[in-house]
Image: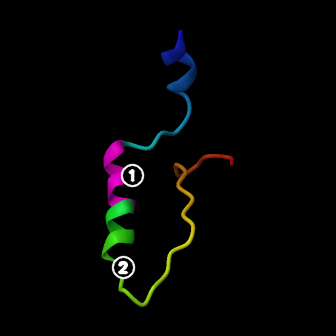
C-alpha cells in the first residue's frame, strides 16, 4: 500500500544526498555554507 502512495512522488536517492554533502565538504575554506535544503526536482514544497 505504501509503495502505491509514494511511487507517484519524486524521490531523492542516497547517492544524491551524498553528492550534496561532498559538494559542501569540497567547498573552499573561505566559503561558509550555513544551510542546505534538499528536495527533489518537481516537488511542490
Secondary element type, mark 2: loop
* Residue labelled with disc 2: 27
Is the residue marked by circle 1 packed among few (<14), some (14-19), or many (20+) residues within 10 Å?
Answer: few
Q: Which sits earlier in the primary sequence, circle 2 or circle 1?
A: 1
Is 29 positioned to the left or the right of 33 in the image? left
Image quadrant where residue 28 sits: bottom left
Closer to us: 12 or 8: 12
Closer to us: 15 or 30: 30
Image quadrant where residue 36 sits: bottom right
Q: Residue at x 53, y 15 (%)?
A: 2
Closer to us: 24 or 40: 24
Q: Is residue 30 magenta?
A: no
Q: Which mark is residue 17?
A: 1
Q: Residue at x 50, y 26 (%)?
A: 7
- The vertical placement of 16 against 21, above or below, is above
Q: Is residue 19 magenta?
A: yes
Q: Residue at x 55, y 28 (%)?
A: 8
Task: Look at the image and give the residue range highlighted in magenta.
Answer: 14-20
- The vertical placement of 42 against 27, above or below, is above
Is 25 positioned to the left or the right of 11 in the image? left
- The vertical placement of 36 against 39, above or below, is below
Outermost residue to the top:
1
Image quadrant where residue 5 sits: top right
Secondary element type, mark 1: helix
Q: Residue at x 37, y 86 (%)?
A: 29
Q: How far is disc 2 from disc 1 in space, using C-alphas?
A: 16 Å
Mark 2 near mark 1, Cβ–Cβ under 8 Å? no
Outermost residue to the bottom:
30
Residue 27: image x %, image y %? 36, 79
The main secondary structure of the magenta stretch is helix
Amino acid at each position: 500500500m505504501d509503495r502505491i502512495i509514494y511511487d507517484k512522488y519524486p524521490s531523492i536517492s542516497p547517492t544524491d544526498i551524498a553528492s550534496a554533502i561532498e559538494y559542501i565538504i569540497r567547498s573552499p575554506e573561505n566559503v561558509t555554507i550555513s544551510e542546505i535544503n534538499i528536495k527533489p526536482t518537481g516537488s511542490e514544497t
